[in-house]
Amino acid sequence: MAEPFKSDLKTGAERYLAKVMVSAFSEGWRKPEDFLRHFKPGDLMQRLEKVPDLRAAILIKAAGVHERIVRKKSTASATEDLRIALDEGLTTPADLLDLIPVDDRVRHLERAKLWGFLTEEHFWEPNASAGAGQAVARMVYLLETALGESLLSLQDVTDGITFETISARLPHKELQRVVKQALEAGRKKTPFGEDALFGVVPLKDLLGHIPLDHVYKRVIVAKLAQPAGFIGSAVGEEAWPEDDPASEKPHIEPSTEAPKGETKRGAPPKPNKAEAKEAEETVTDDELEEVPVPSGGSVSSRPPAEEEARRKVADRLSAINRLPPRHNDLSTPILLSIDSMYSELLTAPTDEAREMCIRDSFPNEAHLSTALLALIELLDPSIDVNDPVIRDADAESLIKVVLFEERRRYEQANPAGRGPAVAPAPPGSGGKRSVPPPLPGNEKRAR
């Protein structure tokens, strides 16, 4: 049996990141390929400029650079060598990661980007791919590791979840046990605090009854990640924590039904950086509290800073004619991700780059599909996005439709030298398309 990982880093926050990263790989939460999406060769070579011995070792072992010239390599040249080594299979993401000790990753790489990598798949969301049992176990690990590093206290955990939520969510039998123990402690004139509570209801059992998105927002984000500096302007992914569960916080919006795949608001890994930073600086813990909805009117329960951020995003997307017609139905994270996507998509040079830009802008396929369906409704109103064929299509097909429609718009605006690329509607469809059209040139990309 392997010995538990022990970090030699100086601070609890650094040791915490190191321990979580080790578990992320050993438990299969994250893969080396995921790491290299967040830390590309250029990022690694630039961040390791101040540790020339480590950078040299990586280039020698991974890229085969001769040791006599490795220290004379510029960052640009080193980046190119490492990228070619990965492209040509001279090294693999797993091999490359083995050359960078865990403590050195935390010591030299950006803390906020590391946190974004570790939480990218949003396992705490109700529609996440991980099973409920796995999600609870992972949340317990994050909390217990933070408790072990003194980044959290048991009081932080209960304050974040709140006694109101605990009492409302615990099953009747569990509440009876808590009350019984509290009364017995009172007779003995001994305090019944958090230690006693978790003695009666272990943390794992408690989290099995509490919505994990609530725990993530109110404890992990508010009590751990923000104070420790894991959430910064470099990533900004947690600028808009998801709302409380609907059963605890009514939320009334003009839409009648949420888009498929979007049952809760989540936080995207790549929102617009300026808006994420502004949101992070302006949204306070008080603003995350429940906002009452007055009877007789439809109002948004979003904090004022969030509403302002949404307005700015809507203005930018309107300026480039890419604001979905039902953008009010979209959650803030999805809207920010669309904005982030279009900051790069229209200037990407190849189909491969455009597809990667689309995928990298969203934390999971549910957010991706919801956003793409909203954009398809804008780009080609003749496509019925409620048709099951298009509504239930996989992400790959939806990406092809968006790329096709973007190319069609480009060719209509630049007609010289090329004819229109619009696919005809199927016979008998009344002019409406529900099947994703083929993407011109896709056969070349498939090769």
Image (spheres, rainbow, N blue to C red):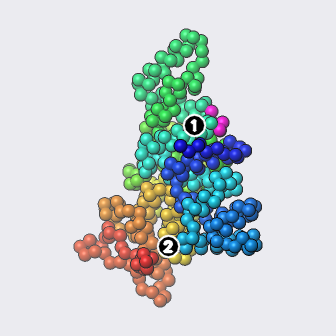
Give how far across and how far down residue 290 sits, in percent.
53, 38
Residue at image coords 46%, 62%: 324
Q: In the drawing, does residue 391 fall left or right of residue 37?
A: left
**Badge 1 amino acid:** Glu
Region of the chain picked out in magenta, as a range = 149-153
**Badge 2 amino acid:** Glu
Give how far across and how far down residue 197 sits, in percent.
53, 25
Q: How many marks?
A: 2
10 Å crowding of disc 2: few (<14), some (14-19), many (20+): few
- Res 139 seen here: yes
Quadrant location of residue 10? Answer: top right
10 Å crowding of disc 1: few (<14), some (14-19), many (20+): some
Residue at image coords 56%, 42%: 142
The answer to whether residue 151 is magenta is yes
Say whether marks 1 and 2 touch (CB < 8 Å): no
In this orientation, which residue lies closer to the viewer: 420 or 316? 420
- Res 255 seen here: no
Q: Which residue is mark 2?
A: 352
- Main secondary structure type of the part rendered in magenta: loop
Q: Secondary structure at mark 1?
A: helix
Q: Secondary structure at mark 2?
A: helix
The answer to whether residue 98 is magenta is no
Residue at image coords 60%, 15%: 190
Give how far across and how far down residue 390 sits, in percent.
34, 64
Quadrant of the rendering where the C terminus is positioned: bottom left
Q: In the drawing, does residue 171 fall left or right of residue 7?
A: left
Residue at image coords 49%, 40%: 137
Q: Which residue is mark 1?
A: 144
